[in-house]
Image (cartoon, grey):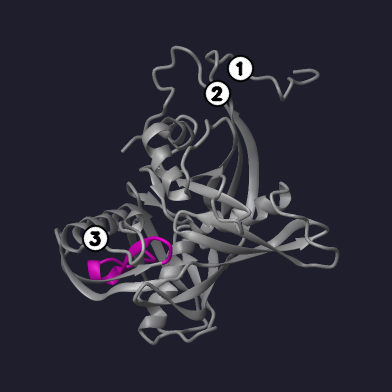
Amino acid sequence: MEGGLAASRLPPRAPGTPVLSVVDMHTGGEPLRILLAGCPEVAGPTLLAKRRYMRQHLDHVRRQLMFEPRGHRDMYGAVLVSSELPEAHLGVLFLHNEGYSSMCGHAVLALGRFAVDFGLVPAPPAGTCEARVNIHCPCGLVAAFVECEGGRSCGPVRFHSVPAFVLAADLTVNVPGYGKVVVDIAYGGAFYAFVSAEKVGLDINSAKTRDLVDAASAVTEAVKAQFKITHPESEDLAFLYGTILTDGQDAYSEEPTANICVFADEQVDRSPTGSGVTARVALQYHKGLLALSQTRAFQSITTGSMFTGKAVRKTNCGDLKAVVVEVSGQAHYTGVASFTVEDGDPLKDGFLLK
């Protein structure tokens, strides 16, 4: 149309309903929808209290942003909130197709860039090539380090995790349809079950994604039913987020090791999974397969994208031995959008197809 249409003009919407303004990014192919404006105040004295409040009172915002027709089954999101921690530059609540996660590494990598580019942290001094962004996640404070040039982000981002640890090694669970399967359970801001795909009769490089999702989901349900997840410091964090199927190549190598993460309600991560890489590094370190400061490359079998990870120092989480893990990856911007709700739309809060 000659002259074009006004980009800022919004379609008709229900009176009094906010416009949901977002910036979209991806890290290794895994989307991140960052809510800039339109969310009612998320009340609560702490970040975990805010997470509970949003689940109980503002879940329609999650559904509107994550579900069809505005999103899709595998959409991922972030709501920025204030933090009670004085050292935090921002707080964040993570959204997915089932609810609210405790940690998301791919989101932290993207949010590091976002915080620098949108002025949420002071501009780095002239000549400084890296800015630090302290991000308060539900699992705790995570430090992101963002490569900068001319006051803007550029290149990869790396982050230092909360203490990561192994909760159970070589645990045998009975998985319906697959028999007895040996799994490991490790924490990298969220708990995952880890199992080599060959133990459920699959070749991770050639199997259909649907078959991998079915197997991973069966493992998740079996672990939930047969093993109690506990966290040394918070009951809010004591849940199994998903299962990561691997190629079984856990011993150190200069070659990348591949995996696929299936989390929440059969949601498939397109990236190597930042919190999963964190937990997998902790697991490899725990088993003596990876030394401190030894960098390993992790590849997503869905997109081929890469993260690197290494254990940078020993620490503790409660009485458990743990490590702080550094994960590095590249995030990119994909666009901006404004979402509205129209009167009379029976699907205004979204839907998902199985």
Residue 207 lies, in percent from the top left, at: 33, 61
The residue closer to the viewer here, 17 or 88, is: 88
* Residue at 39% in and 87% down: 288
The amino acid sitting under disc 2 is: Thr
Residue 20 lies, in percent from the top left, at: 57, 30
Disc number lying in front (2 or 3):
2
Task: Confirm or deny contact between disc 2 and disc 1 (CB under 8 A).
Answer: yes
In what quadrant of the picture does the N terminus appear?
top right
Is residue 44 within the magenta segment? no
Mark 1 falls on what kind of element? loop
Q: Which residue is mark 3?
A: 219
Task: Confirm or deny contact between disc 3 and disc 1 (CB under 8 A).
Answer: no
> In the rendered image of this protein, does residue 321 appear above or below residue 5?
below
Q: Earlier in the sequence, mark 3 or mark 1?
A: 1
The residue closer to the viewer here, 206 or 48, is: 48
Mark 1 Cα within 10 Å, few/some/many (few <14, many 20+)? Answer: few
Q: Earlier in the sequence, mark 2 or mark 1?
A: 1
Residue 206 lies, in percent from the top left, at: 37, 64
> In the rendered image of this protein, does residue 308 appear above or below residue 48?
below
Q: Is residue 265 left or right of residue 42?
A: left
Mark 3 falls on what kind of element? helix
The amino acid sitting under disc 3 is: Val
Q: Which mark is residue 340?
A: 2
Q: Residue furthest right?
A: 126
Q: Which residue is mark 1?
A: 11
Residue 94 lies, in percent from the top left, at: 47, 48
Question: Does the image show residue 272?
Answer: no
Mark 2 falls on what kind of element? loop
Question: Does the image show residue 291?
Answer: yes
* Residue at 22% in and 55% down: 221
The residue closer to the viewer here, 294 or 323, is: 323
Magenta stretch in the rendered image: 188-206
